[in-house]
Amino acid sequence: MARIAVGGFQHETNTFSPTLATLEEFEKHDGWPGLSRGEAMFDAVAGINIPIEGFIQAARDDGHDLVPLAWGSAEPSSYVTEEAFETITGMLCEDLAAKGPFDAVYLDLHGAMAVEHHEDGEGETLARVRDVVGFDIPVVNSLDLHANVTERMVQMSSVMTIFRTYPHIDMDVTAVRVYRQLQRILAGETMAKAFRKSPFLVPLTAQWTDAPPNRALYDMVMAEELDGVANVDLALAFPPADIHDCGPAVVAYDPDPERANAVADRVIGAFIDAESDFDNALLSPDDAVQRAMGHGAGPVVLADAQDNPGAGGTSDTVGVLVALVRNGAQKASIALLNDPEVAMMAHQAGEGSVLSVDLGGKSGQDGQAPFNGDFRVERLGDGVFECTGEMYRGVTTNLGPMALLKVAGADCDVSVVVSSNRFQNLDQACFRHIGVEPTEQQILVVKSTVHYRADYDPIAAETLTVEAPGAHPCRLVGLPYKHLREGVRLEPMGPEHQVS
């Protein structure tokens, strides 16, 4: 039986987003639990499809002694503040020092965290952990498919495994895979590492793993494991991160260094060969709405991909809402639009009342303004509901006061689900909690990029990706990268980044 320390620190950093990830954001229970420490951590993550819970259950099944550290996650945004980073890494390292010695450490990380004072958040976190426990015991971790993997992260980790699905339905399974690798290390095996970086970036809208070329690439990754390599993973990365090491990567492990390197070369080679096959088709709001209105059956799902709070968007831009009203859309609903001020006004006014308000557009983004109009308060909710889709299995939200508002005084039938906390609409429960049945709508607008597909594709007559305003840019050419390494192609088949 091994004594294993377990903890986690999760953030996906969009350096182009206007809001920071403060300590308060990590302490907040929104979609995932708030910051927890010690024994309370086990209760906080229990039953949820997140990596740390997958690791905990696998290790407990084999009788290992698990020692909880701390676990925290904040909704994607711009940089993690220095205070938040120092506080949470301080918890992890203090407890490692106080509760040791250990036979191993497992950390549930994202892989795309940037901090106000450290560009490579995970690399710095792992280095601090190594300062406490040394290099004589294994330190393993699981990462998100959107990880911007760095050389330092690889050096500081004994093994890391990475999600293989987008939408991320395999979060807990990914941690079970790293647990199996840890078992081999504890049994005496030494894992050689191979690390390769991509010469180009891939927008999130082209990373759906059920679409080509991604499906074939991940089939190849799994085939390599079936052929005998200990582990190989492909991270498609998080491109709206202005850091030196932004971009896709391959990491492979095996007791045989030649095998690890050969597999890494094959996978990165296949990825590069597929460069011209990535699809980043985006529609204007008007084109998307008109196409959805002309569809013979519903619901047609419109992904408001650039205002996705799960990628650092503010979830309050109104570009698609304007297009719905302008085109006279019928049986159309949009969720979730983050506006705590309007949500509170709706609760104070009550159901059935009519409000004249400025909705959304309050996050201070250039060129963005609220939607001014009259809205009837159709339904109120407390923002606490259980997600029913596979990806957020086990999640109970806490989104604060919510309201269903219907546009009044216009020749359309458009409803808006307003929330008080940012939350990516990747689950049909976001609509049902507030009285909207998704299957009865002609148009469903979700502020999500790809994750919505796990729960919405089964009911969708068609899905369309919309290029409306937002802080999550889905076209990377022209973004003001300052720290990205020179020569990286900014999109598949795109121009190379030039350092000014």
Image (spheres, rainbow, N blue to C red):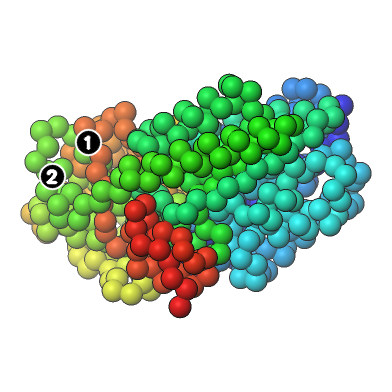
The CA distance from mark 2 to mark 1 is: 10 Å
Badge 2 marks a residue whose secondary structure is helix
Position of the N terminus by quadrant: top right
The amino acid marked with disc number 2 is Arg
Q: Secondary structure at mark 1?
A: strand
**Is the C-beta separation of discs 2 and 1 under 8 Å?**
yes
Residue 238's spot in the image, x, y percent?
Answer: 48, 53
Q: Which residue is located at x 29 percent, y 71 percent?
A: 368
Residue 178 is drawn in which quadrant? Answer: top right
Q: Which residue is mark 2?
A: 291
Checking the image for residue 13, the label placed there is: none
Up the image or down, 40 lies above or below 224; here it is below
Rendered position, 423 above or below 20: above
Residue at the bottom extreme, as displayed: 500
Which percent across, then down, holds residue 113?
59, 58
Does the rendering let one see residue 152?
A: yes
Q: Please say whether residue 447 is visible from this viewpoint.
A: no
Front-most of 497 and 104?
Answer: 497
* Horizontal side, residue 493 vs residue 256: left or right: left
Residue type at mark 1: give it: Glu
Identify the residue shown where x is 62% and y is 46%: 195
Q: Nearer the viewer, residue 282 or 362?
A: 282
Quadrant where the C terminus is found in the figure:
bottom left
Mark carried by residue 462: 1
User: Is disc 2 surrounded by few (<14), some (14 to 19) or many (20+) residues within 10 Å?
Assistant: some
Viewer-proximal residue among 387 and 261? 261
Q: Residue at x 85, y 48 (%)?
A: 135
